[in-house]
Amino acid sequence: MADSIYLTGLDQLEASTNKILKDLTSDKTKLLLTNAQLVRDRIKEKAPLGPSTDKKPGSLKAAAYAAALPETTTRQTVAFAGIRPRKAPHAHLVEFGHGGPHPAPPHPFVRPSWDELHDTVRNNIAEGLGKTIEGAV
Amino acid sequence: MIIEQAIQNQLLNNAGVAALVGTNIFYDGTVPQDTAAPYINLAKISAPRDYTHDGASGLVDSRFQFSIFSTQYTQNKLIAAAIAGALSGFRGVMGGAGGVTVGRCFYEDETDLGKEPQTLFYHLAVDYKIGYNE
């Protein structure tokens, strides 16, 4: 008499896998955006105000932004945190310093923000994706 | 010895860097008036500290920016390469006797900041992540 093996639950496995993929696709953009906003807020905190003679003090803080683009067939999900160059075209001169006409040393605010937060952001993303996967199973 | 002095010594003692910039390596945020290019201005950008349940670990994960100024774009690139020869991948005591113990030194980033209109110097900023014991 030949032994027989019956596999059951393949439908549920397929459904769970599909749900994980669907949930991950929708949740990861939100997750990346939330974390980009965290970095943006730190950039805003650290952005220097400039001299009191400045025509528009706080322009760097106002130019801080965060955005996320969802995944497409040709691009992975991507998130940004930084300074809008059209709103604050001098941001790189503040961040990196310059040699003239009035030489200024660097007054970095973007890179320190990232250096302080990258471990937190990495952990948040790992934790968030883990929760999405657990929730889908 | 502070880490800035250790880095300065490390660069001054490197034949490649010395041949290109001589002793024009500064770390206090200012460059003396009328300094002839090329020169390197070193700045600490960030230095997050590491903590354990026992308190401060004494490890610092710092980022340094080397602002390179010279009259030629290609010379900036040569200086950046010379700095990499002195620092990239370095492990050990930096800066000679009484120096700073460095666990890692990574060439992190490079940004071309163009030709400055008044000084006519090209500006190249290179970033290093340096992990050291304080």
Image: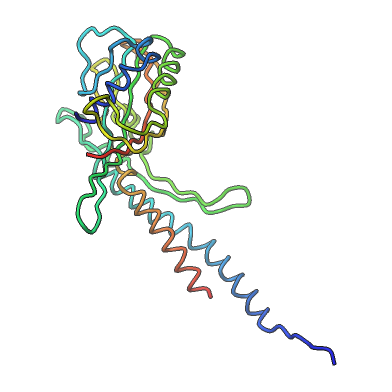
Q: Quadrant of residue A49?
A: top left
Q: Residue furthest right?
A: A1
Residue B57 in percent (x, y) is at 24, 49
Left or right: residue B107 compared with residue A100: right
Residue B108 in percent (x, y) is at 41, 34
Given residues A85 and B126, the one toward you in this image is B126
Residue B119 in percent (x, y) is at 31, 10
Q: Quadrant of residue B85?
A: top left
Residue A14 in percent (x, y) is at 65, 74
Name the residue at 30% across, 21% down: A98
* Colouring method of the image: rainbow
- On the rendered image, what quadrant is the N terminus of chain A found in? bottom right
Left or right: residue A51 compared with residue B50: left
Name the residue at 59% across, 52% down: A72
How many tags in the picture?
A: 0
Q: Is residue B131 above or below residue B120?
A: below
Q: Is residue A75 above or below residue B33?
A: below
Left or right: residue B104 compared with residue B57: right
Name the residue at 27% across, 25% down: B95
Q: Residue furthest left?
A: A52
Name the residue at 31% across, 11% down: B118
Given residues A78 and B51, the one toward you in this image is B51
Q: Is residue A56 above or below residue B26?
A: below
